Amino acid sequence: MLRKNSFSAKQLIAIIADYRNAGLDPQDVAVMALAEKVILDQHGITQDDINGLLAYGLKDDEVLDIVLTAAARSFYTKVLDALGTESDDVGMELEPELEAAIMNVGSHP
């Protein structure tokens, strides 16, 4: 979705490597930080995390959408991984370097 609607392959590779230093605007960084926290440290989410997004002008329902989308995507991916199956979008055409970056997510120490 991000590739189709917003970012070039080069931009996505930078986002995958380190979204905080990928040239994104601060609101996008805050959105990605919350999504990351939903997936990796959901118990660590605080009101300050939510307030940070509200300060950018997001509404409560938009923050909820971020949380639900991150949680749903994480759930979907874990189910596929647990069953050893692939997503229907596996056959989509990606640049080799973008595909490699995606495949290496989570393999960093």
Image (tube, grey):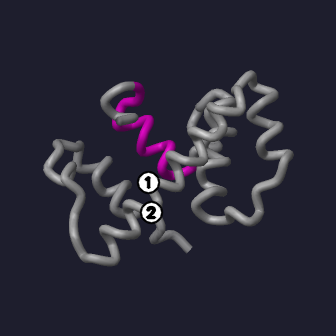
Q: Is label 1 in a helix, a strand or a loop? A: helix
Q: In the displayed image of the protein, which residue is found farthest to the right?
A: 48
Left or right: 44, with 74 as reference point: right
Residue 105 belongs to magenta span: no
Q: In the displayed image of the protein, which residue is found farthest to the front?
A: 61
First to last magenta residue range: 6-18
Label 1 Cα crowd, 10 Å radius (few <14 / some 14-19 / many 20+) = few
> Toward the viewer: 43 or 107?
43
Inspect the image, locate mark 2, and give the three-letter code of the amino acid beneath it: Phe
Inspect the image, locate mark 1, and give the three-letter code of the amino acid beneath it: Arg
The secondary structure making up most of the magenta span is: helix
Pointer 1 residue = 73
Residue 16 belongs to magenta span: yes
The image shows residue 66 at horizontal and vertical percentages of 58, 41
The image shows residue 31 at horizontal and vertical percentages of 63, 39
**Rendered position, 88 above or below 32:** below
* Number of callouts: 2
Q: In the displayed image of the protein, which residue is found farthest to the left?
A: 91
Q: Are marks 1 and 2 in contact (CB under 8 Å)?
A: yes
Label 2 Cα crowd, 10 Å radius (few <14 / some 14-19 / many 20+) = few
> Residue at 68% across / 65% down in the picture?
41
The image shows residue 38 at horizontal and vertical percentages of 63, 57
Instruction: Specify the quadrant that holds the C terminus.
Output: bottom right
The image shows residue 12 at horizontal and vertical percentages of 42, 40
Pointer 2 residue = 75
